[in-house]
Structures are given as structure tokens and as C-alpha cells.
Image (cartoon, rainbow, N blue to C red):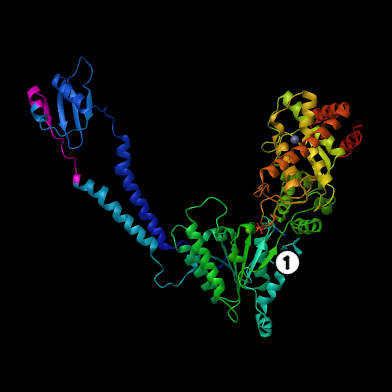
Amino acid sequence: MSIKKKPKFPKSNQIGNILLAIAGAILIGNWVIPELTKPKIPRVPYSFFIKQVEDGQVQAVLVGDNEIRYQLKPQGDNPPQVFATTPVFDLELPKRLEDKGVDFAAPPPPKNAWFRTLLNWVIPPLILVAAFQFFMKRDPQGSISLNKSKAKVYVEGESEKITFEDVAGVEEAKAELAEVVDFLKNPQRFTEIGARIPKGLLLVGPPGTGKTLMAKAVAGEAGVPFFSISASEFVELFVGTGAARVRDLFEQAKKKAPCIIFIDELDAIGKSRSGGGGFQSGSSDEREQTLNQLLTEMDGFGVGDETVIVLAATNRPEALDAALLRPGRFDRQVLVDRPDLAGRRAILGIYAKRVKLGEDVDLEAIATRTPGFGGADLANLVNEAALLAARNHRKTVAQQDFYEAIERVVAGLEKRSRVLSDKEKKIVAYHEVGHAMVGALMPGGGKVAKISIVPRGVGALGYTLRMPTEDRFLMDEGEFREQIATLLGGRAAEEIVFDRVTNGASDDLRRATNLAERMVITYGMSQVLGPLAYEQGGKPNFLGTGDGNLRRPMSEKTAEAIDSEVKEIVETAHRQAIDILKTNRELLDEIALKVLATEVIEGEELQQLLDRVQKPA
Ligand code: ADP
Ligand code: MG
Ligand code: ZN
């Protein structure tokens, strides 16, 4: 698919820009630069000047309206000093100067004074006004609103058409959108029966799961024009144009019906107006006008009208204004979630076709290792693997390339260049082995697959790679507790071995505490507090992002109870981690030494070592 009509910056705006630049240049050249480069003459109080006159030290004076400059009589070989002072109303001044025999005069008028005045004070404002007029000028015929709405139009039958074949792993969303394609292809079939064609569909899901891609695929499948615009483009410099853009967009779309309007990143204009979110930006008025216009337009086209379907995408549905979600607007919401195992396998299939695969490549195994990856991550993964193969001068991409690429994507690029001191290395080694050994006994739904003390990315000095044993959506209380213990394993090892702790565990501690708090306030897993949700009410944060730590209003006693319960959970896990490591102290040393020697332990070797971890008595 390609852009049919390239949106151009309107010509008039370009002229406006040039005029603005000229005005700016004149101002800078005539005012700012001289002001900055003016030689600095020391300023003295007027009284001091008079005193010097009376003392007969002054040789000559220039009396200006705003400034008096004077020169002292030369002393020895030094060049005469020059001072400036601000005049006060002093009728006596000429007489005093005369009495002391000082030369004085008014400063000569600057050359071309009238011209400078003109340049400084008359022309720039004129240019500013002209520039402003150019900016504000509407198209004379009001015709090509494409320029104004900046929407990109994709039309059927052009190169690189995107279809549903290019999207995988989001089957439910696909099914729902297939229905939309049907509407667009045969609107009569639906309207004849009296069915109302939905106006708005909201694609909701985390970033990189293929929302934008799907919207394009709908247009590709239906073979209709596709107006695409990002909501942030609506909100622009001058108040009022956001709303105007929305109006233009819909006007044009109606002319081309049946067609699709796609508004990406809808939350940029559709944020809740109740404003519970805290800070108020200066553009909130503008946003509101734009939003209102959008609502009006969506209400405006109705039964029997042209078939214009509005698709929108957002990854923050909870932030949207409720008015947007009412019937007749975006009343259908389609969840575009991260793909499951089969979905990841299918997406990998799409992208693997575009590179040359080695014989040993097992996409199934790669899919198993990439829970949590979205479509964009997987596309990126395949590309990374291909880059690795090319860098190693191989003709095809091998399984090993994929594994390495996974780690890259997961943990950031390997940074061997970063040097740790021997002591730091030792601490990191024990820390990571601590995680691994506790994780061996308390897996919490995962399995330790690798220990590494090769620093990677920002912050992480070493890492222990835990692979989930299967795709999990539900975890029980025991597993949460095990995860917390594993998180604390690193710090526990530092305590046991070095008898002191470093700051290296801060991220572990934060995650452990968050997990414990969520167990108590969100999942109702505390015996003491019972199955209540103490979290700030409202919609569940289905993206799983954010810490979800906002507690709802509660009594002080409850808050204290929660705190002590969270503390209890974390401390119990900490004790368990310490117990495990103390029981296996020799093994801890043995594995840590191995890691120090090789920097990385994984696979069979690691499993055999971890199998020897004993349960504490
Ligand atoms: P979103 O709009 O949800 O943030 P995009 O649609 O922009 O994500 O996805 C970015 C890129 O990732 C797409 O261009 C595509 O190459 C790839 N991608 C994402 N999701 C999928 C998917 N489900 N199937 C195939 N490719 C995908
Ligand atoms: Mg997108
Ligand atoms: Zn750690």
C-alpha cells in the first residue's frame, strides 16, 4: 500500500515561515547582537561622577539622554579610563562642568538614525503581521481539505497491499474485523434487513500487537479507501484547527464512501475530561474541542447514510472519555492482545518466510521461549536473528541465532566492554547463583535456564534467566510466594557470603515488594485481610502495566494491616531464601566459582548443578 496523495505543507504556510525567519533575523541582527557585544563600560553612581568632577579628575563628558559617559584625565602611562553613569535631573550640571573646565558635549546622532529606527521598530512588526496573516489564511476555494486534515489515504489495488494474511496470532480480533469487511463490501445486504452498521470500532491492546496493521488489513481486504491519521496530529498549533481537521476529514470521507477512517493513538484526544489524572496541560481546551467535534461527527452520520466506518486504536482504554464509548460511537471494542503460544508460532511463520532458515530451525521451540512477546517483538526477533547470522558470515539463519536474538531482545545488547572489578564480579556471581538456587527449589512457575555475569544493557550487572515452563495466565498463592523468594535469593546470598549487602538488589526488592503488595490488595490472597480488593477502584488494568499500587481510601488500621501483611510475606520469603542457601552453602560456593570462571552457565550443566540443591531440614 502506498500513499496516494502526499499531504503537503500548504504553500502559504511556507511563505509565512520565511517571513517569520526574516523578521527574526532582523531583530537578532539589530538588537540582540549589538546588545550582547556592546563594550562593557563600568557604571558608577551619579554622585560618584559629581565627586570626580569636583575633584578635577574628569577630562571630558558626553551627556546623552539616557546615559552620561565620561573620561578621566590620564594618569601616568595608563590609557584614560572611561565610565558611565545614569543622569539624574540636574540643571546645575553644565555649570559645574564649566567651572572645572571639563569639555562636554551631547553625543553625535548615530549615523542613519532614521533608517535604524525603521529597521528595528517598524519593519519586524509589519513582517510579523504579514506572516500571521499567511498562517491564518484558509484555502481560497475551500477545496483541497487534504492539506488541512493531513490524513493519509490508502487506496485499493496499489502495491504492497496488506491483508489479513499478514496478521496472525489475534484470531478473535480478526474474526470481528472480517465482519466489518463484510459490511464494507456489501452494505445493502445489511441495511436491507434493517440492521444498523456499526460506526465505530475501537482496537484496544498493548503497543506492538498489530492494531495499526489490522486496520490497514481491513482496508486492504475490503478494497476501500482508508483515511489514516494519528490523533496527536489533530492537536496543533492554533486553537480551533484540531476541530476543523476532524470536520474536513469526515467531509472527505463521506465523499469517498464506503471507506474507513482510522484514528491511531486515540487517547491523545480522547482522554477523560473529568481530569482525575492530575496535571492539566495548556492544550486541554484544544483537546476538548477536537474531541467534541469528533463526537459530533460520529453522531452526525446515521442510518442509510454513506458507509463510513471509524476504526480507532489505543493502548490506554482506561484513559478514554466515557462519552467516546457510548452506543453509536465506539460501541464495539476489539481486544488485540499479546499472542499465545500458537499465535506466536503463527506470527513467526509469517516473518520466517522472509529470511533463509537453516535446517535445524524449530519455530515451535522459539515460540515456547518467547512468552509475552508481541507481534512487533517477534518481527524484530526474526530480523535480529538474521542480522546475527549475516554477521557470522552464514548463508542461513540457525536456531542458535534465534536463541541469541531472544536474549538480546529480552535483556538488551550484550556489553562485554563494561568491566567489573574482581570484587564486584564475585558479588554479582554469588548474587545470581543465589537467585538460581532458590529458584531451583521454589520455581514459582518458572525454571532457571541460565546464569550469566556478563553485564548487559543499562543497570543489569548479571542476570538469571528464568523461562516460564508453560504459558500461564493463572498463578496461585504458593507460586507468588516462590517468585518472591527467588527474587530475594540474590540478596540473601550476598548477606550469607559477604555479611553485608550492596545496592545491586534494589530492583529485586522493589519487584518482590510490589508482588507481595499486589497479592494482598489486588488478589485477596491474605488470610488476615480476606478476599477484598483494597486497590483503587475502577477498571482493571488489563494491560498489566503500571504497578497497580494505588490503594483506595481506607482506614488507618487497614492500611497498617496491609503494610504488616506485605512485610510478613516478604520477610517469610527472605527467611526461606536464607534457609535454602545456608543449607546448600558448599554448593553455592561451587556454582559461584564455576560462574566466575566461565561467566555463563546454562543447559544441561546448569540443570545437573541445580538438581543437587537440598531442601532445608
Ligand atoms: P500497534 O499499532 O498495535 O502498536 P503495529 O500494528 O504498529 O502495532 O505493529 C508494528 C509492527 O509489528 C507491524 O508493522 C508488524 O510488522 C508487526 N506486527 C505486530 N503485530 C503483528 C501481528 N499480530 N501479526 C503480524 N505482524 C505483527
Ligand atoms: Mg499503532
Ligand atoms: Zn538480582
Residue closest to the eye, 11 or 169? 169
146 with respect to 413 (left or right):
left
Residue 100 included in the magenta stretch of the image:
yes
At 48% from the left and 60% from the top, the residue drawn is 286
* Residue 444 sits above or below residue 208 on the image: above
Q: Is residue 188 among what the camera can see?
A: yes
Which residues make up the magenta segment? 96-113
The image quadrant where one finds the N terminus is: bottom right
Residue 184 point in image, percent of width and height: 65, 76
* Residue 262 sits above or below residue 109 on the image: below
The image quadrant where one finds the C terminus is: top right
Residue 22 point in image, percent of width and height: 34, 51
Packing grade of label 1 (10 A; few <14, some 14-19, many >=20) is some
319 with respect to 370 (left or right):
left
Residue 303 figure quarter: bottom right
Residue 554 point in image, percent of width and height: 66, 48
Residue closest to the eye, 261 or 166? 261
**Ligand 2 picture quarter:** bottom right
> In this view, which residue lies farthest toward the top?
76
At 8% from the left and 26% from the top, the residue drawn is 98
* Residue 493 sits above or below residue 339 on the image: above
Amino acid type, callout 1: Lys
Residue 572 included in the magenta stretch of the image:
no
At 77% from the left and 53% from the top, the residue drawn is 356
**Circle 1 is placed at which residue position?**
174
Q: Secondary structure at mark 1?
A: helix
Residue 389 point in image, percent of width and height: 75, 46
Q: Is residue 464 among what the camera can see?
A: no
